[in-house]
Amino acid sequence: MLKTINNQPMANCIFCQIANNKLPAYIIYQKDDIIAFLDNNPKEAGHTLVIPKQHFSNLLEIPAELLANTIKVTQKVAQIINQKLKPDGLNVYQNNGPIAGQAVDHFHFHIVPRYQKEPPIKKENLQAVAKMLNL
């Protein structure tokens, strides 16, 4: 069953569908209320999204406790990416609203590894990136 907001299924939310195993994704990390998976359109190899499984549109809607848990998982996933892919740096960011660059109306963090030279693997090869992250 899909997660709901205001008792309405979020069937049209791609992230809700991933969180409910209705769409496939390369999952990096998962716990009861949070999931992290590779971005389908990565900016760099290892670009990962961290989301609460329950639907909240943005930072202004998510409860503080779930927000705190989500950023803790974001840090843990960033550590895994840093250890396995050895980027030269990382961007961690979160957008609110289309004007701010939010493409999916479901609260999420981006973790984007950054490389000075060629990344260890092509960003489009999600299966190979997932394998490097030991999935």
Image: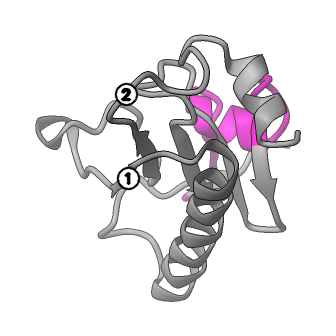
Placement of the N terminus among the 4 image quadrants: top right
Q: Which residue is mark 2?
A: 117
Q: Which residue is mark 1?
A: 89
Report helix, strand or loop for mark 2.
loop
Q: In this orientation, which residue lies closer to the viewer: 123 or 38?
A: 123
Tell me the kind of residue under disc 1.
Gly
Q: Looking at the picture, does residue 108 appear above or below residue 135?
A: below
Residues at marks 1 and 2 touching, judged by CB atoms closer than 8 Å: no
> Number of numbered discs present?
2
Q: In this orientation, which residue lies closer to the viewer: 98 or 115?
A: 115
- In percent of the image, x 78 and y 35: which residue is there? 132
Tell me the kind of residue under disc 2.
Lys
Residue 8 in the image, given as x and y percentages of width and height: 61, 46
- Location of residue 53 by image quarter: bottom right
Could you give the CA–CA distance between mark 1 and mark 2, rounded to whole angstroms?
Answer: 12 Å
Q: In this orientation, which residue lies closer to the viewer: 20 or 35?
A: 35
Q: Looking at the picture, does residue 26 appear above or below residue 124?
A: below
